[in-house]
Amino acid sequence: MSQQQTVLYDAQGPRARRRTLIGTVVAVIALLGLAFVVYRRLDERGQFSMEEWGPLIDPGNDAFDAVWRLIGEGIVNTLKAATVAMVLSIVLGTLIAVARLSLGRVGRIPLIGLVELFRGIPVVVLVYIGVRVLPDVGVDLRGLPGGQVFWGLVIGLTVYNMVIFAEIVRAGVASLPKGQREAALATGLTSWQTMRIVLLPQAFRTMLPAIISQLIVVLKDTSLVTFIANFDELLSQGESIQRNLGNPIQTFFVIAVLYIAINYALGRLAQWIQARQARGGSAVKATARGDLAPVRDGA
Amino acid sequence: MSPVLDNIDLFVDGFLTSLEIILWALAGTLPLGVLIAACRVSPIPPLRAFGTFWVTTFRNTPLTVVLVFCAFGLPELGINRSFFFFGVLGLVLYTSAFVCEAVRSGINSVPAGQAEAARSIGLNFTQGLRYVVLPQALRTVVPPLGSVVIAMMKNSAVVGAFGVGGDLWSTGQRLTSALGYETFPIFVGGVAVGYLIITLTAGALLQVLERRVAIAR
């Protein structure tokens, strides 16, 4: 990315290179100055003391083992909730998309309404409905493995993400060349077989980057439960650690780094898959590059 | 739905406070996002690195973590403001990464030949930017930027859940926990509907805007 080609400027001549050099020096000084101001401020308030950091980074510290056991549990619970919600969203989303594609013009109206409805409600409200409202109206999930809050969270996340998946799958199938469906039907497959054997497998391949990007969104959204109920996911664990140790900056820094590490790795995986598909080897090469860029709006 | 109608004035207040959060956050995040995008496409390497760092950080951190950082971390540094300020600040920082990516993708979507053609007919840098590149980039930016903004409107509920009083979410919270109303009518009939009014209206406006600026390429 160092020699990034943009439309904004040409290859640089000697004068422009000199200007860039001056800009570089100024920018480095400004950024270092900013970093220094922040550093001084943190240091003045003793934020770099081992008292604050010890439990997180010093294996000899009394609290170290307990802290990292809590964090480990948090990561496991976060991943569990995200994975279950993801699998359910993909399954339900695919069903919605297939139904929407196979129903007629009138039949699909309620489904479009459903998609628009759930896409318009904040996911935190849906998680609240899953965790708090469902038990109040008599939906008892305590018997399931994982318990009430886990399934409430999963239901909230699933309802929100299944309609996003429905859209991803629909776009994926719609982006396939028309000949795929026509050829499948011509060989005598029924329309359901066409969908299952020919269209969906190809669509899923092109959708893989979008699916992984959405997994990042789901993973981040599991932390919303912190504000709603007790569930030992990563952020909640960080909350209880800093409440006991009194070091919010250090604890949340570590928590943030963990989230960033997991999500960054997933993001790179999505990019890698997309690049590989764009290079070829896929029957739907043309569509892999096109309009199925990963969906990563601020959700 | 009568629990909602009985408290309709509270809900209207909450609705307006939510709008207030959204407008403040928009006013902050759009300029900031454009600024970060400018860093990311600039010819100066350290600025590009800074932009990439910013986007990677805020895109991969949950909004909730950004919010707790603002609210628990900044006071430790001697920055004491209201929860409302910290809430909006968190939303601004978080959303700016997505705004940046939307704007950058718009700029990059303009084919390089456009700027080359502009230069070859004798337009200078500013003219080329003003008459050729930006008009095309802005149009491409509208749909992704619109969905970022709508996502931000929904995320304002997280700011409410985080403890900023008086918005739609907090109204629902107060009615159910302090005043003992049933959760179902309040949250399904009140809070969810309130947010739907915001997001569906914004979605409709966005569609009109998209149709108006649409270009065939």
Image: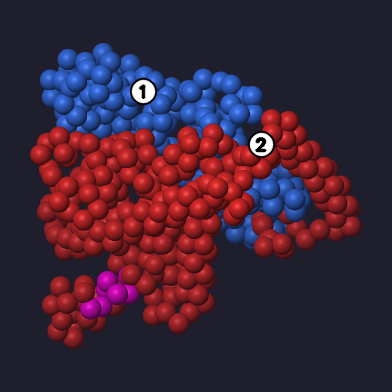
In front here: A1 or A255? Answer: A255
Where residue B167 sits: x, y (%)? 36, 23
* Predominant secondary structure, magenta span: helix
Where residue B27 sits: x, y (%)? 53, 28
Q: Which residue is mark 1?
A: B167
Q: Is residue A289 left or right of residue B129?
A: left
Which residue is drawn at the image coordinates 72% and 35% (left, top)?
A43
Which residue is drawn at the image coordinates 44% and 50% (left, top)?
A70
Q: Secondary structure at mark 1?
A: loop
Marks 2 and 1: which is nearer the front?
2
CA gap between label 2 and label 1 equals 34 Å
Q: What's under tag 2, amino acid-wise?
A: Gln
Do the residues indicated by labels 2 and 1 lie within the same chain of the protein?
no
Q: Which residues are magenta?
A: A197-203
Hue used for the chain lettered B = blue
Number of residues whose C-alpha sits closer than 10 Å to that of mark 1, classed few (under 14), some (14–19) or many (20 or more):
many
* Quadrant assignment, res A165: bottom left
The chain carrying label 1 is B
Which residue is drawn at the image coordinates 38% and 48% (left, top)?
A233
Q: What's under tag 1, amino acid-wise?
A: Asp
Which residue is drawn at the image coordinates 33% and 16% (left, top)?
B13
Q: State which chain is coloured red.
A: A
The chain carrying label 2 is A
**Quadrant housing the C terminus of chain A:** top left
Q: Is residue A96 left or right of residue A79?
A: left
In front here: A74 or A177? Answer: A74
What number is the disc on residue A47? 2
Q: Secondary structure at mark 2?
A: loop
Q: Is residue A255 magenta?
A: no
